[in-house]
Image (cartoon, rainbow, N blue to C red):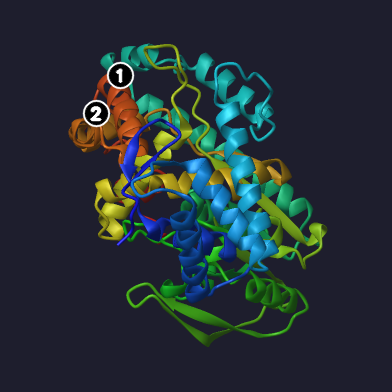
């Protein structure tokens, strides 16, 4: 039993000291550089504990930085320089993000597609949908069906443009990669894009990237037993690159199969070959992540990036956060299709955000085209579906130092949804809408 019982977080909150977290953070750093040895991570974690016990008195309250300093020291002294470097880089990035989120930091964020956002804002303003107040006014006037029509038309127009760009490059493109953060609408958009391109004679061979997950037992997890599927290192990137390179050359590969029920991957299951008149179609969170397709020449790839870039201010004059829209979408989708309770999605979301801020969003600028998948009418549909849940989570996680992220998100989203006129009848929403991917009732075979 450890002689230490508490640790002080950067927020000042005092939480229980859990040695398993040290093992986890070492393993996560190892995974980021290609390591998968949990026993070695546990061995190094034990050495960190010995160091702490030899250098600090019983009952000492560590701060997070002291623990991280000890981890760095042990990694370096035991010959794990690559893992130590990854850990140091992670610390540096975390520190930078905290600085950038402070009210004194005003540097332009280069990860934001400003040109696309300006177009989204211009559209919202011209349709009287750039504030919750204006949205509510139109809803009270009975204009919900009209808002649906306007929003869907804007989305479909963007897909037309994307299809035109790909068509112009069809002689050189060998793969179309649809990427974007969780619940941005990749599945439906991929389906709709394929429909458009098939009309100009393009044929596709889909590659299901989920089949390249490592076995579940090799994934990092936290002290709550929650596995991290969001990081690109959860995928066998080396095997993906090998298969992509061979497919582009016209060779046949045997795609593995990942069983989510057992958490196991079976090798060499499904044969796949790109025919001379076919293009590989890839729907993946990490399609823009450079190591994902490093073996493929840039001119052979068309990279499409999706994000619900809603431009609407709440009652306080702050823009509604895109991550909150995607959180709600994922809650609804996972509760129906993955038997995953909305509360579980809330508690897991910090993993989602951490991975996408590091491995997805920074590469948005490398996309060939960006599609805004937000629908100005979607928030009213979420009010009666999830407002009550968010209101219950606020007091449940208030004051819990281990669930600060969940509390802050629940508080923000509940306040946002409270201010919006609810719409229970979703019948005006087309059965082919990207939103049907989340609220159900899709007429497309996209699940």
x and y, in percent, of residue 392 in the image = 17, 34
Of the 4 image quadrants, the one containing the C terminus is: bottom left
Q: CA distance from mark 2 to mark 1?
A: 8 Å
Determine the secondary structure under disc 1: helix
Circle count:
2
Label number found at residue 423: 2
x and y, in percent, of residue 72 in the image = 61, 54
Residue 295 or residue 26, whichever sits in front: 26
Label number found at residue 104: none
Residue appearing at x 48%, y 17% in the figure? 127
Residue appearing at x 53%, y 75% in the figure? 37
Task: Determine crowd level at label 2: few under 14, some 14-19, many 20+ residues with C-alpha closer than 10 A.
Answer: some
x and y, in percent, of residue 53 in the image = 43, 56
Q: Is residue 425 left or right of residue 128?
A: left
x and y, in percent, of residue 81 in the image = 69, 63
Determine the secondary structure under disc 2: loop
Task: Determine crowd level at label 1: few under 14, some 14-19, many 20+ residues with C-alpha closer than 10 A.
Answer: many
Q: 415 above or below 444?
A: above
Residue 220 or residue 4, whichever sits in front: 4
Q: Earlier in the sequence, mark 2 or mark 1?
A: 1
Pointer 1 residue: 139
Residue appearing at x 72%, y 84% in the figure? 251
Q: Residue 50, can we see it?
A: yes
Of the 4 image quadrants, the one containing the N terminus is: bottom left
Q: Are marks 2 and 1 in contact (CB under 8 Å)?
A: yes
Q: Is residue 125 left or right of residue 252?
A: left
Q: 157 above or below 118?
A: below
Q: Quadrant of residue 34?
A: bottom right
């Amino acid at each position: 039993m450890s002689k230490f019982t508490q640790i002080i977080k950067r927020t000042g909150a005092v939480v229980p000291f859990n040695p398993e977290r040290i093992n986890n953070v070492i393993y996560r750093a190892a995974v980021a550089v290609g390591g998968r040895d949990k026993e070695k991570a546990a061995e190094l974690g034990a050495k960190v504990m010995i160091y702490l016990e030899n250098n600090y008195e019983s009952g000492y309250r560590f701060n997070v930085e002291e623990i991280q300093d000890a981890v760095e020291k042990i990694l370096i002294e035991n010959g794990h320089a690559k893992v130590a470097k990854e850990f140091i880089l992670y610390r540096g990035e975390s520190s930078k993000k905290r600085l950038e989120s402070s009210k004194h930091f005003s540097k332009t964020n280069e990860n934001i597609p400003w040109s696309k956002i300006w177009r989204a804002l211009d559209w919202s303003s011209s349709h009287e949908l750039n504030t919750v107040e204006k949205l509510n006014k139109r809803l009270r006037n009975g204009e919900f069906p009209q808002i649906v029509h306007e929003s869907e038309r804007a989305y479909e127009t963007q897909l037309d443009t994307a299809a035109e760009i790909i068509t112009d490059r069809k002689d050189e493109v060998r793969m179309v990669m649809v990427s974007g953060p969780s619940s941005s609408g990749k599945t439906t958009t991929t389906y709709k894009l394929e429909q458009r391109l098939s009309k100009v004679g393009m044929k596709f061979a889909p590659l299901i990237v989920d089949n390249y997950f490592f076995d579940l037992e090799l994934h990092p997890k936290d002290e709550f037993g929650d596995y991290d599927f969001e990081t690109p290192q959860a995928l066998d990137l080396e095997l993906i690159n090998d298969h992509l390179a061979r497919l582009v050359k016209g060779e046949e590969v045997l795609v593995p199969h990942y069983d989510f029920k057992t958490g196991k991957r079976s090798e060499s299951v499904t044969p796949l070959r790109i025919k001379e008149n076919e293009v590989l179609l890839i729907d993946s969170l990490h399609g823009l992540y450079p190591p994902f397709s490093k073996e493929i020449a840039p001119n052979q790839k068309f990279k499409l990036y999706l994000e619900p870039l809603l431009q609407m201010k709440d009652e306080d004059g702050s823009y509604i956060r895109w991550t909150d829209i995607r959180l709600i979408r994922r809650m609804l989708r996972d509760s129906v299709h993955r038997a995953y309770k909305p509360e579980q999605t809330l508690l897991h979301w910090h993993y989602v955000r951490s991975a996408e801020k590091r491995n997805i969003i920074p590469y948005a600028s490398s996309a060939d085209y960006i599609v805004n998948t937000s629908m100005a009418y979607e928030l009213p549909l979420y009010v009666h579906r999830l407002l009550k849940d968010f209101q219950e989570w606020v007091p449940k996680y208030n004051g819990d130092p281990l669930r600060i992220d969940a509390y802050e998100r629940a508080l923000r989203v509940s306040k946002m949804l409270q201010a919006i006129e609810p719409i229970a009848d979703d019948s005006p929403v087309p059965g082919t809408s990207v939103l049907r991917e989340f609220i159900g009732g899709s007429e497309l075979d996209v699940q």
